[in-house]
Image: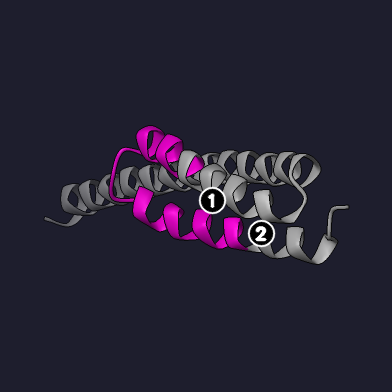
Amino acid sequence: MCMYVICKYVCIYLYVCLYVCMYICMYVCMDACKHVCMYVCMHACNHVCMHACMQPCMYACMHVCIYICNMYEYMYACVVYILHVAYLLLVHYICVYVYLYV
Protein backbone atom coordinates (compact mmCIF):
# COMPACT_ATOMS: atom_id res chain seq x y z
CA MET A 1 0.00 0.00 0.00
CA CYS A 2 1.23 3.46 -0.88
CA MET A 3 2.43 5.42 2.11
CA TYR A 4 1.26 9.03 1.82
CA VAL A 5 4.16 10.41 3.87
CA ILE A 6 6.79 8.75 1.65
CA CYS A 7 5.07 10.04 -1.48
CA LYS A 8 4.87 13.50 0.05
CA TYR A 9 8.62 13.54 0.70
CA VAL A 10 9.32 12.29 -2.84
CA CYS A 11 7.24 15.11 -4.26
CA ILE A 12 8.96 17.67 -2.00
CA TYR A 13 12.29 16.35 -3.31
CA LEU A 14 11.05 16.80 -6.88
CA TYR A 15 9.87 20.32 -6.09
CA VAL A 16 13.32 21.25 -4.70
CA CYS A 17 14.99 19.62 -7.72
CA LEU A 18 12.85 21.62 -10.13
CA TYR A 19 13.24 24.83 -8.12
CA VAL A 20 17.04 24.53 -8.37
CA CYS A 21 16.67 23.67 -12.05
CA MET A 22 14.70 26.88 -12.63
CA TYR A 23 17.68 28.97 -11.53
CA ILE A 24 20.10 26.90 -13.62
CA CYS A 25 17.78 27.21 -16.63
CA MET A 26 17.93 31.00 -16.46
CA TYR A 27 21.50 30.77 -17.73
CA VAL A 28 21.20 27.95 -20.28
CA CYS A 29 18.82 26.83 -23.01
CA MET A 30 15.40 26.57 -21.36
CA ASP A 31 13.92 23.77 -23.46
CA ALA A 32 16.96 21.48 -23.29
CA CYS A 33 17.33 22.07 -19.57
CA LYS A 34 13.63 21.35 -18.98
CA HIS A 35 13.92 17.94 -20.64
CA VAL A 36 17.09 17.06 -18.72
CA CYS A 37 15.49 18.22 -15.49
CA MET A 38 12.34 16.18 -16.10
CA TYR A 39 14.43 13.10 -16.94
CA VAL A 40 16.55 13.45 -13.78
CA CYS A 41 13.54 14.11 -11.54
CA MET A 42 11.49 11.26 -12.98
CA HIS A 43 14.45 8.89 -12.73
CA ALA A 44 14.90 9.87 -9.07
CA CYS A 45 11.16 9.49 -8.52
CA ASN A 46 11.14 6.01 -10.07
CA HIS A 47 14.08 4.95 -7.91
CA VAL A 48 12.51 6.17 -4.65
CA CYS A 49 9.04 4.88 -5.51
CA MET A 50 10.43 1.43 -6.26
CA HIS A 51 11.02 1.12 -2.53
CA ALA A 52 7.78 2.82 -1.51
CA CYS A 53 4.67 1.82 -3.40
CA MET A 54 5.54 1.50 -7.09
CA GLN A 55 2.75 2.38 -9.55
CA PRO A 56 0.36 4.84 -7.79
CA CYS A 57 3.16 6.84 -6.19
CA MET A 58 5.28 6.81 -9.33
CA TYR A 59 2.50 8.16 -11.54
CA ALA A 60 1.51 10.79 -8.97
CA CYS A 61 5.08 12.03 -8.67
CA MET A 62 5.61 12.04 -12.42
CA HIS A 63 2.48 14.15 -12.91
CA VAL A 64 3.62 16.56 -10.18
CA CYS A 65 7.04 16.75 -11.85
CA ILE A 66 5.58 17.50 -15.30
CA TYR A 67 3.12 20.05 -13.87
CA ILE A 68 5.80 21.94 -11.94
CA CYS A 69 8.24 21.85 -14.88
CA ASN A 70 5.61 23.24 -17.24
CA MET A 71 4.54 25.85 -14.68
CA TYR A 72 8.13 27.06 -14.34
CA GLU A 73 8.56 27.14 -18.11
CA TYR A 74 5.55 29.46 -18.46
CA MET A 75 6.69 31.56 -15.49
CA TYR A 76 10.17 31.85 -17.01
CA ALA A 77 8.75 32.89 -20.39
CA CYS A 78 6.53 35.46 -18.66
CA VAL A 79 9.43 36.93 -16.65
CA VAL A 80 11.61 37.12 -19.77
CA TYR A 81 8.80 38.89 -21.63
CA ILE A 82 8.29 41.41 -18.80
CA LEU A 83 12.04 42.09 -18.62
CA HIS A 84 12.15 42.52 -22.39
CA VAL A 85 9.28 45.04 -22.32
CA ALA A 86 10.89 46.87 -19.37
CA TYR A 87 14.18 47.04 -21.28
CA LEU A 88 12.45 48.44 -24.39
CA LEU A 89 10.63 51.04 -22.28
CA LEU A 90 13.87 52.03 -20.58
CA VAL A 91 15.62 52.45 -23.94
CA HIS A 92 12.63 54.43 -25.22
CA TYR A 93 12.66 56.83 -22.26
CA ILE A 94 16.44 57.26 -22.47
CA CYS A 95 16.08 58.12 -26.17
CA VAL A 96 13.26 60.58 -25.41
CA TYR A 97 15.33 62.18 -22.63
CA VAL A 98 18.39 62.49 -24.88
CA TYR A 99 16.25 63.93 -27.70
CA LEU A 100 14.52 66.51 -25.46
CA TYR A 101 17.34 67.62 -23.18
CA VAL A 102 20.58 67.06 -25.08
Residue at the spot x=40%, y=33% of the render?
31
> Which SS class for mark 2?
helix
Residue that label 1 marks: 44
Residue at the spot x=31%, y=38% of the render?
29
The residue type indicated by label 2 comes to Val
Of residue 94 and residue 101, the one placed in the foreground of this image is 94
Q: Is residue 5 magenta?
A: no
Residue at the spot x=52%, y=53% of the render?
18
Res. 20 in view: yes
Q: Main secondary structure of the magenta part?
A: helix
Q: Is residue 11 left or right of residue 29?
A: right
Q: Compared with residue 56, is residue 3 higher up or lower down, i.e. above or below?
A: below
- Counting from the top left corner in percent of width and height, residue 28 is at 28, 44
Callout 1 crowding tier (Cα within 10 Å): few <14, some 14–19, many ≥20:
some
How is this picture coloured?
one colour
The residue type indicated by label 1 comes to Ala
Q: Give the Cα separation between the discs numbered 2 and 1.
A: 9 Å
Pointer 2 with pointer 1, Cβ within 8 A:
no
**Residue placed farthest to the right in the image?**
1
**Quarter location, residue 24:** bottom left
**Quarter location, residue 20:** bottom left
Q: Compared with residue 9, is residue 73 higher up or lower down, i.e. above or below?
A: above
Q: Is residue 25 magenta?
A: yes
**Residue placed farthest to the left in the image?**
102
- Counting from the top left corner in percent of width and height, residue 37 is at 45, 44
Identify the magenta region: 13-38
Residue that label 2 marks: 10
Of residue 1 and residue 67, the one placed in the foreground of this image is 1
> Which SS class for mark 1?
helix
